[in-house]
Amino acid sequence: MSHTIRRVTPSDAADIADMIHGLAEFERAPDQCTVTETQITAALFAAAPTVFGHVAEVDGEVAGMALWFLSFSTWDGVAGIYLEDLFVRNRFAVAALPARCLRPSRPNASTTATPDCRGRC
């Protein structure tokens, strides 16, 4: 079984929307989740994205996702990230993917995000 964690691409939008709806079902609030694939695409791939993401693949199939956005601490004067959603499809939960999604995908990767990290994180 091969595992890969990578930045999202436009072709992942349908899987991401599906997993967000899966998260809503898990939270027992499926009727409150109205997000669409079109909204996900716009949020992730606009000229100035409002959210960023990574997907976990197992043998080429999207198994999980992490969606995050930039934050800024006015008290400390530093940028950071806020992890909005971390979701792994049930059939892949045994592969320890939730923990893998939280680790940097490359050695010495920064855990602090800056606006110019898009495409390089």
Image (tube, rainbow, N blue to C red):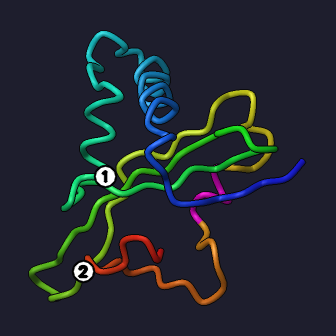
Q: Is residue 26 magenta?
A: no
What residue is rendered at 43% in x and 71% in y?
119
What residue is rendered at 66% in x and 39% in y?
63
| Principal secondary structure, stretch drawn in magenta | helix
The kind of secondary structure element at disc 2 is strand
Describe residue 102's horizontal placement relative to residue 72 as left or right.
Answer: right
Disc 2: which residue: 79
Q: Which residues are magenta?
A: 98-102
Describe residue 10's horizontal placement relative to residue 57 as left or right.
Answer: left
Residue neighbourhood size for the residue with mark 2, other residues' Cα within 10 Å, grouped as few (<14), some (14–19), many (≥20): some
Q: Is residue 101 magenta?
A: yes
Q: Is residue 114 above or below residue 17?
A: below
Q: Residue furthest left?
A: 74
- Name the foreground residue: 83 vs 35: 35
Amino acid carrying mark 2 in the image: Ala
What residue is rendered at 60% in x and 42% in y?
64
Describe residue 64's horizontal placement relative to residue 74 as left or right.
Answer: right
Spatial CA distance of label 1 from label 2 is: 21 Å
Q: Is residue 80 above or below residue 16?
A: below
- In percent of width and height, residue 57 lies at 69, 47
Disc ID at residue 7: none
Nearest to the eye among marks 1 and 2: give it.
1
Q: Residue furthest top?
A: 31
Q: Is residue 103 above or below residue 5?
A: below
Q: Residue furthest right?
A: 1
Disc 1: which residue: 45
User: Contact, CB < 8 Å: mark 1 with mark 2?
Assistant: no
What residue is rendered at 85% in x and 53% in y?
2
Describe residue 1's horizontal placement relative to residue 74 as left or right.
Answer: right
Mark toward the start of the polypeptide (1 vs 2): 1
Amino acid carrying mark 1 in the image: Phe
